[in-house]
Amino acid sequence: MTKIKICGIKRLEDVLIVNKYKPDYIGFIFAHNKNRTITLNDALLFKKKLNNDIIAVGVFRDNDINEVIEIASSGAIDMIQLHGSETTDFILELKKHTKLPIIKAYNNYEYADYALFDNVDPGRGKTFDWNNIKTDKDFFLAGGINTCNIDLALKLNPYAVDISSGVETNGFKDEEKIKEIIKKVRS
């Protein structure tokens, strides 16, 4: 069964919603200059309130490796998602400092645990050409996924769907949209 990640958790209210509907993963964004970015202190607080069955993923985009290692070591996250131009050397160096599984977007995912396919300009709720997905690796599918196109996304057999703006209203997580998309994925 395809797993579900609700990304861009930025408020305690969001944590309470996901605890109620239990996606497999949630995402805390640490990429700089993004409207869903949170601090490490927020992530630590949210992680304490998060249901233990939900895996917290830290999302980074061209962050300094020391920052990624610090956050990975803090206990705030259970997985690392690299969403930028991080190189194979970056991933191998990261693996020397943490045992957390790594998701890598776009390319250079050979040494990551999972691939991620997303729009090149993430977080805008726009899909991309899903016909270009070619990998033998388990992959997360992101980029404009919502209740209108989730059935098409699931036909690609992703390991997980990664949803953010597709479960938002006016920039905030919407409980009804989260409930509806989780129900569709799990039915």
Image (cartoon, grey):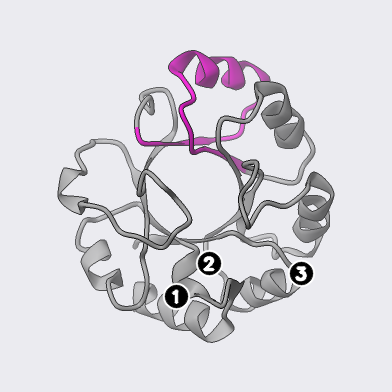
Q: Nearer the viewer, mark 3 or mark 2?
A: 3
In which quadrant is the C terminus drawn? bottom left
Q: Quadrant of residue 108?
A: top left
Tell me the residue that label 3 is attached to.
12
Mark 3 or 2 closer to N-term?
Answer: 3
Q: Nearer the viewer, mark 1 or mark 3?
A: 3
Tell me the residue that label 2 is attached to.
23
Mark 2 or 1 closer to N-term?
Answer: 2
Give left or right: position of 123 versus 73. Answer: left
Alpha carbon distance from label 1 to label 3: 20 Å
For the residues bearing labels 2 and 1, Cβ distance under 8 angstroms: yes
Say which amino acid is labelled 3: Leu
Where is residue 164? Give x, y as percent: 50, 63
User: Is residue 25 shown in magenta?
Assistant: no
Residue furthest out toward the bottom = 176
Vertical comparison of 126 with 94: above or below: below
Say which amino acid is labelled 1: Ile
In which quadrant is the N terminus drawn? bottom left
Mark 1 or 3 closer to N-term?
Answer: 3
Part of the protein shown in magenta: 79-106
Give the residue displayed 67% in from the left and 71% down from the top: 14
Say which amino acid is labelled 2: Pro
Alpha carbon distance from label 3 to label 2: 16 Å
Give the residue displayed 70% in from the left and 35% down from the top: 72
Vertical comparison of 106 with 24: above or below: above
Residue furthest out toward the left = 131
Pick whichever, 64 or 96, lies toward us: 64
Where is residue 24? Give x, y as percent: 52, 61
Give the residue displayed 46% in from the left and 19% down from the top: 87
